[in-house]
Image: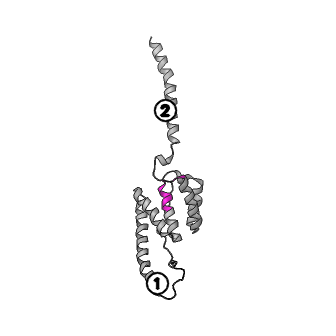
Amino acid sequence: MQSTSKSKTHKSKPVLYMLLSLGVMLWQFTPVSQISPIGPVWAAPSYSQAESEYKSGKYAQALASFQALNAAYPSNVLVHYYLALCHQNLGHMGQAKAEYQLVVASGQPQLAPLAAKGLATLSGARSGSGSASSNSNSSPSSSDTGVKVATAKVKKVLEFWAEW
């Protein structure tokens, strides 16, 4: 009888190893977005292109690339941070503020403080430009179309990258 129980134990070990191996394999293919709030976007082929466009100052192209990434990964905090930077550099302060607020609200430990600094910079830029725009309204050289154009260049908030 003992030999029968030993043979059953021997036969069950390969099955156990197979199940463990299968579990490890499935865990390896779990999307990073389910593990980390930053998600798998850094591995996406278009992410490196978008980041390269941003770093080379092609903010309009980078914005389009990051918007495409946002469509694929809408909850990715890093994409929202770069969207905020692109919008800020293009002078889209309202959109930049909204993206920064999303990043701050995420509580992501690396990016939320950077986004808070970006919001503070936007607040400082608005308060500084508010007095300048009131002076330009009284000047006779203001535009007849009523469109106000920002003349000051926006400072880059921060450059962020990670090597994973």
Residue stretch rendered in magenta on the structure: 72-82
Category of crowding for the residue at label 1, using alpha-carbon neighbours closer than 10 angstroms: few (below 14), some (14–19), many (at least 20): few
36 versus 18 height, above or below: below
| Res. 130 image quadrant | bottom left
User: What's the CA distance linking mark 1 and mark 2?
Assistant: 72 Å
Residue 22 locus on image (x, y percent) = 52, 34
Residue 8 locus on image (x, y percent) = 48, 18
Residue 15 on the magenta span: no
Residue behind mark 1: 137
* Coloring scheme used: one colour
Of the pair 131 and 51, the residue shown nearer to us? 131
The image's mark for residue 91 is none
Q: Inspect the image, locate mark 1, and give the three-letter code of the amino acid beneath it.
A: Asn
Residue behind mark 2: 20
Residue 76 locus on image (x, y percent) = 49, 54
Of the pair 24 and 33, the residue shown nearer to us? 33
User: Which residue does the image show at 59% across and 65% down from the upper left?
Assistant: 61
In the displayed structure image, the side of residue 147 where residue 110 appears, left or right: left
User: Which residue does the image show at 43% across and 71% down from the upper left?
Assistant: 122
Number of on-image labels: 2
Q: Secondary structure at mark 2?
A: helix
Q: Quadrant of the N terminus?
A: top left
Category of crowding for the residue at label 2, using alpha-carbon neighbours closer than 10 angstroms: few (below 14), some (14–19), many (at least 20): few
Q: Inspect the image, locate mark 2, and give the three-letter code of the amino acid beneath it.
A: Leu
Magenta stretch: dominant SS? helix
Q: Secondary structure at mark 1?
A: helix
Residue 80 on the magenta span: yes
Residue 38 locus on image (x, y percent) = 47, 53
Residue 158 seen in this snapshot? no
Outermost residue on the bottom side: it is 140
144 versus 22 height, above or below: below
The disc, 1 or 2, on the residue closer to the chain's N-terminal end is 2
